[in-house]
Image (cartoon, grey):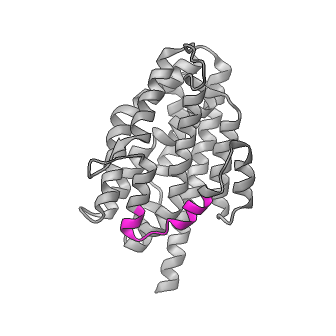
Amino acid sequence: MKIEEIEIILQPLREQLRNHALYSELKSVTDVQIFMESHVYAVWDFMSLLKALQINLTCTSLPWKPVKNTNTARFINEIVLEEETDVNELGVLKSHYEMYLDAMVEVGADTTKISGFLNGMNELNGVLKTIDNSDLNDAVKSFLSFTFETINTQQPHKIAAAFTFGREDLIPDMFLKIVDQAGKDAYPKLEYYLRRHIELDGDDHGPISLKMIQELCGDDETKWHDVLECSEKALQQRLNLWDHIATAIQQNKEITV
């Protein structure tokens, strides 16, 4: 099994996401607020997937020692540089998560819940319990739990699968639809964030992530099957989250009519 085969198998799930009803629901500022208040958790836990890969694929301890595979180390360090310390629309260095929070403030979305949630996160061992005990909706809880269960495997090829096929490789398609629905110059910070993701993920991070999967799996068929299984689960989690957000937006419209 190789990348091309996995992409063919995943195509039906990816098509469901590309054509999800959620995108057509994003018609007003209120719709975008509801979307962002749930999606922000996916923006945050994406960074945890990223850092888990950096920890596993580079040397982050002392004394420093050379890693076994400098290709995968270079791949992940390139992505970390731009995800954790990118330049926002004003030329200020910020992580993409922080840019997203700024965009939430711009459209009037509530950032206090995600900020309070993160304040309760102190160590990896307690993350799943914190998620379970939180007042987040079930879709977000399940989404986050899958992410950290994958991270806890400490198996880079599985983490990379969730990162690449469930997230990084898919983001340009999803965000193009959201930008189109938002309208030109409607939300400058949000549009910049989305356009930046499209630029980086479509042209750079997506292809780099696929190379990383190839390096991590090599000729190991068991690892390739793990990648497929993890990718399918990640995409299904994304679909479930999208279903929840679409329903929340629809219900809000019914209440306000």
Q: Horizontal and vertical percent for residue 202?
A: 36, 37
Q: Nearer the viewer, residue 141 or 3?
A: 141
Q: Give the answer, above or below, for where 34 lies relative to 124.
A: below
Q: Nearer the viewer, residue 96 or 62?
A: 62
Q: Main SS type for the magenta part?
A: helix
Q: Give the answer, above or below, for where 243 lies relative to 123.
A: below
Q: Toward which corner of the image does residue 228 lie, by quadrant?
A: top right
Residue for point 65% across, 52% down = 121
Asked whether, in this view, residue 224 is left or right of residue 110, the answer is: right
Q: Which residues are magenta?
A: 104-117
Quadrant of the frame with the N terminus: top right
Residue for point 60% across, 33% down = 159
Q: Horizontal and vertical percent for residue 80?
A: 45, 34
Count of residue discs = 0
Residue for point 32% across, 45% down = 196
Q: Horizontal and vertical percent for residue 251?
A: 54, 76
Q: Nearer the viewer, residue 156 or 124?
A: 124
Q: Horizontal and vertical percent for residue 130?
A: 71, 55
Q: Is residue 197 magenta?
A: no
Asked whether, in this view, residue 89 is left or right of residue 1, the answer is: left
Residue placed furthest toward the left: 185
Asked whether, in this view, residue 22 is left or right of residue 146, the answer is: left
Residue for point 42% across, 50% down = 174
